[in-house]
Image (spheres, rainbow, N blue to C red):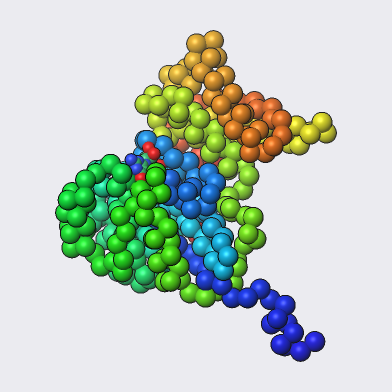
Amino acid sequence: MSSGDIKDALPANIKSGFVALAGRPNVGKSTLLNLLVGEKVSITSPRPQTTRNRVMGIMTRSGIQVVFMDTPGIMRERSRLNKFMINQSLKAGMECDLLIFMTDAERPNYDSDRYALERLGGKKVPRLLLINKIDAVKKPELLAQIAELIKIAQFDEVFPISARTGEGVEAMVSKMVEYLPEGPQFYPAEMKTDQPERFYIGEIIREKAFRALQQELPYSTAVAIELVEDRENGATYIMGSIFVERDSQKGIVIGKGGSMLKKIGTMAREELEFRFGAKVFLELRVKVKEKWTVNPASLGDLGYVDKE
Ligand code: GDP
Ligand code: MG
């Protein structure tokens, strides 16, 4: 076999690369990622900080593969957990082929944007500014915001978009692809995320808990999946624990006579069954893990460890 034959056997070069999605919490990064990937790979919530670890979402189209890293928002850190999350974001911002910086047109905050951009450091890769939630503001307001934002940092392109309605998103994608290098297809086309299954299941349960409890649940709530087992009858058996920080929170998550936990479990099970296309048995417990947001050992137990 000549080298020419080998080359012919390899997939043709396509436009491919890694793109970091950065910005303050709650600007809509996860919403955009899910839209681009066409599947829910990252949880979204009206409350900030629902994205913990960085989540990879893979968008594959004909001749294009973009691996997005959805990152927790960059803001001034307080707890150890926040520090961990921010380091993840900064790393993603530094290890990418292109950086998307997203802001929220509905709630502009130039000081926070400036802070996040400073933390991301000087411009090393192409940088796009996405002003999201344009469905919620008027044009003149938007123009004023663009004028302010381009004073803060240098961007190669500016795109007003709505991750909710999809407005402006395709135009942004076409331009973004122009900035990406030629490269291999890193992942199979069917692969939408690199997250291990357990993490994904945990995120679905955590999202349902947030939806069911809204303001009552602190964002420090974590879910650990202890067991995922395919049974012979075709069903999947999943056992997980919801970790809260205090006894009082445990009571809230369990609810009167277990009603709240049952509600969370039912919502999660329905989504898991839909996703797996199989019957799911879900057993959930609530455990108190005191001060786990500041205890490095328990952070490790729950999978929030910085490997480097
Ligand atoms: P993240 O923290 O940056 O990942 O933000 P999320 O994707 O979790 O979104 C935060 C909130 O903003 C959620 O309630 C979303 O539904 C909402 N949101 C996201 N994109 C848009 C948008 O284009 N328009 C409007 N009006 N709301 C949006
Ligand atoms: Mg998010």
Q: Is residue 111 visible?
A: no
Q: Residue furthest top?
A: 257
Q: 223 or 136: nearer the eye?
A: 136
Say which residue appears at 51% left-offset and 33% top-offset: 206
In the image, residue 246 lies at what x, y percent?
A: 44, 24
Say which residue appears at 39% left-offset and 60% top-offset: 171
Q: Is residue 60 left or right of residue 179?
A: right
In the image, residue 41 lies at what x, y percent?
A: 53, 46
Q: Using the image, determine if residue 233 lies above or below residue 304.
A: above
Q: How many marks?
A: 0
In the image, residue 306 lies at what x, y percent?
A: 49, 53
In the image, residue 237 lies at what x, y percent?
A: 71, 31
Quadrant in the picture for residue 220: top left
Q: 236 or 167: nearer the eye?
A: 167
Q: Residue furthest right?
A: 232
Q: Using the image, determine if residue 108 lies above or below residue 47.
A: below
Q: Is residue 123 visible?
A: yes
Q: Is residue 51 left or right of residue 129?
A: right
Say which residue appears at 59% left-offset and 38% top-offset: 201
Say which residue appears at 54% left-offset and 57% top-offset: 58
Quadrant in the picture for residue 1: bottom right
Q: Using the image, determine if residue 165 lies above or below residue 67.
A: above
Q: Is residue 139 left or right of residue 67?
A: left
Q: Using the image, determine if residue 160 lies above or below residue 183.
A: above
